[in-house]
Amino acid sequence: MTLILNNQDIRDLLTIEDVIDVLEFAYRELAEGRGALRRRSDIIVKSDTAPNAIYALKSMDGIAPSLGVSATRINSDIITHPQIGDNIRRVKVPAAPGNRYTGLVLLFSTETGEPLAIFPDGEVQPMRVAGTSALAAKYLAKKDARSVALIGTGWQAQAQLRAIESIGEIADYRVYSTQKENRDGFSMEWSQKLGKQIRPCNSAEEAVAGADIVLLATNSLENVAQEDWLQPGMHLSSIKSPEISAEVIKRCDVAVCHVPHGRPTQEFGAGASLPAGIGANIDEMAKRVGLEDMPTLADIISGKVAGRTNDTEITCFLNILGLGYQFAAVGSVLFKKAKEAGIGNEIPTDWLTQIEVP
């Protein structure tokens, strides 16, 4: 039988601690050559669903043999790039029935090849990004880090907050968003959820000043952090390449990447494009900071490369491109917990396999 899980099933089963623990194991396996992955691939065409929209079919794959699984994550997205204030934003359009988004994870057995589970990516996506950022902070931030500046208030930012709270003893949280109502609402909601005061700030610079850990979690397509904001001992993390400039990265004493390339492979249909300069800017940044030769998080976790060596170093983590390997790792835990708890629905695996060799 093949397991089908929905978003509520995943919320009931998966914790951020689960995600961080299995990713830490999986990155060690990857560094030792016991895992495999492929760079994300995007196919993009014009869309008439919304003004100046594009349709993107995105896929990423990974194999975690030690966990007995492989996974493919697929997104089917309508995307726009509106100008909001001074910045260009990347905004997905909820165009599926019920004003919903579409992303699926297919989990397979590496022993039999059979499909083990199918589930939406919506709950796993922010958790695997945030879990990766938290792992980087565990290895790159000061051991006595107590203050966190969070730039952004969307769903990625919420996950980043939950993840960083789970690995440290943070006493001081600040948050900034370009829209006052968002940062005020976020501060009130998450102060109650965490039982700690989260202070809304009037500027990103105010939030970052004196922070031990800075988490950039925005949908901005322009630089968010400034070079002169960096202070000795600070750890900076970014989830999108446009958020952080080459100047900021080069100013850091230790820079670590998630994967050594700045953007996915992309194929465009006639008339489809991204905002002017976006791809070129990312490529230029990658070249200037030597992204191809930068140590990866797997290198740091495995001990192949040293991370922070003293409390005055400025460290940086570029969590700017995801991996299907992450979905394989997290999917293995989710599948095991679901089977143990008897949660989810099942369909005959025969529906998804065949006897004849194609």
Image (cartoon, rainbow, N blue to C red):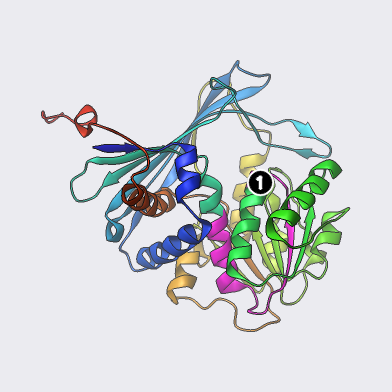
User: In this orientation, which residue lies closer to the viewer: 2 or 147?
Assistant: 2
Query: Can residue 241 be spotted in the picture?
Result: no
Query: Can residue 324 be spotted in the picture?
Result: yes
- Residue 248 is situated, as x and y percent measured from the top left of the image, at 72, 62
Residue 118 is a magenta residue: no
- Identity of the residue furthest to the left in this view: 356
Count up the numbered dots: 1
- Identity of the residue furthest to the bottom in this view: 310
Residue 136 is a magenta residue: yes
- Identity of the residue furthest to the right in this view: 202
User: In this orientation, which residue lies closer to the viewer: 300 or 152?
Assistant: 152
Q: Which residue is mark 1?
A: 281
Q: Is residue 268 above or below residue 207?
A: above
Q: Is residue 158 above or below residue 265?
A: below
Give the residue displayed 60% in from the left and 78% down from the top. Answer: 308
Quadrant where the C terminus sits is top left
- Residue 23 is situated, as x and y percent measured from the top left of the image, at 44, 61
- For the residue marked with disc 1, what is the amino acid? Asn
Left or right of 305, for residue 332: left
- Identity of the residue furthest to the front in this view: 341
Quadrant where the N terminus sits is top left
Element carrying mark 1: helix
For label 1, count other residues whose C-alpha is less than 10 Å away and answer few (under 14), some (14-19) or many (20+): some
- Residue 256 is situated, as x and y percent measured from the top left of the image, at 56, 66
Give the residue displayed 18% in from the left and 46% down from the top. Answer: 112
Left or right of 351, for residue 3: right
Q: Which residues, given as a range, are shown in magenta?
A: 130-155
- The quadrant holding residue 315 is bottom right
- Residue 311 is situated, as x and y percent measured from the top left of the image, at 68, 82
Give the residue displayed 47% in from the left and 57% down from the top. Answer: 19
Left or right of 134, for residue 324: left
User: In this orientation, which residue lies closer to the viewer: 287 or 302?
Assistant: 302
